[in-house]
Amino acid sequence: MRFFHPSIQKFGILSAIVATQLTGGWLSSVQASPTLLAQLSFPDSPGGDGPRRTAGAGSRGECALLTRDSHEMTVLMPSNNIGTTTDANTSLFIYIPQVAVKGAELMGVAGDLIVVDEDNQEQFFGQFTLSDRLTESDGIVKLTLDGVNLEPDKTYRWSFSPYCVVEERNGMSDRIPTLELQGQIQRIDLDSEQQEKLTDAQTMLEQATVYTEAGVWNNAIDILANLRSTNSDDWQTFLESVGLEHLANTPIYL
């Protein structure tokens, strides 16, 4: 039922037209927004005995992670640290504090990512050159696992080790590792109803909503990270639902 101000009847047809435009446009979009935000709250994830989604405080060797407000290196995952995807290949989003090195010239930041299957057989190895901006501030990086070829209904384990690339006195480069971060990934299928909703989705945001309601973390966060500049409230709600709201305003280096 639409709400009309009492002055509509007093000022006649013109006022009614203006009020109709108001309630059918701006006001209705405001009323719809909380519903959309609620749909982007990721459902509770079952507990597990996997590794936690933070790497802990501190550093190893001379390559230091300068934690700000006690924000540790963190993978953006549900609380059980198990990512879910419908795709054979996927991506990870990892928060990395500002990186610094002692006793050498810091040339850049990189990292190694390894994925193994349930038989502990390596399925993916990637070396990633990370954003140079991590030497000046913290940020969220996206690691794309092209070629990992996940199989449905299997659990994969991954580990990520960022490191400082430094220049030594002899002009040669070297790498100094920091802490290691670990987690798990599972490939799952949508049921027929969820697949129909995804097919009917008209926008990327609607697709993210379908994935969120279905509990498919990796697909949802990938879309919302790309939409964050225009849908910051949706990004905030999504992260808040899994206790990562403190990272909502952190820059993302895609």
Image (tube, rainbow, N blue to C red):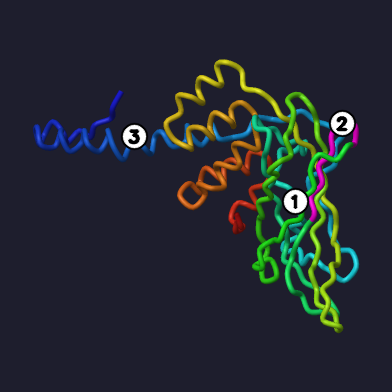
| Circle 1: residue type | Thr
Q: Earlier in the sequence, mark 3 or mark 2?
A: 3
Q: Which mark is residue 149?
A: none
Indicate the secondary structure of the residue bearing disc 2: loop
Above or below: residue 126 compared with residue 129? above
The C terminus lies in quadrant = bottom right
Q: Which residue, given by chain and number where applicable, does mark 3 sit on?
A: 28
| Residue 147 occupies quadrant | top right
Query: Which residue, given by chain and number where applicable, does mark 2 sit on?
Result: 118
Mark toward the viewer: 3 or 2 = 2
Kind of residue at badge 2: Glu
Using the image, tell me which numbered label, if any, was put on residue 74.
1
Which residue is at a point 28% across and 27% down the rendered structure image?
2
Would you call the spot at circle 3 few (<14 residues within 10 Å), some (14-19), or many (20 or more)? few
x then y, percent, for residue 244: 67, 46
| Residue 200 picture location, percent across and down | 45, 24
x, y percent for residue 236:
57, 46
CA distance separating discs 2 and 1: 23 Å
- Give the mark, 3 or 1, whose residue is nearer the N terminus: 3
Question: Which of these two is toward me, 95 or 203?
Answer: 203
- 169 sits left or right of 211 in the view: right
Crowding around mark 1 (Cα neighbors within 10 Å: few <14, some 14 to 19, many 20+) is: many
Which label lies toward us, 2 or 1? 2
Kindly check if marks 3 and 2 are in contact, taking CB atoms under 8 A apart as contact.
no
Boundaries of the magenta span: 112-120
What residue do we see at 76% from left, 24% from top? Answer: 153
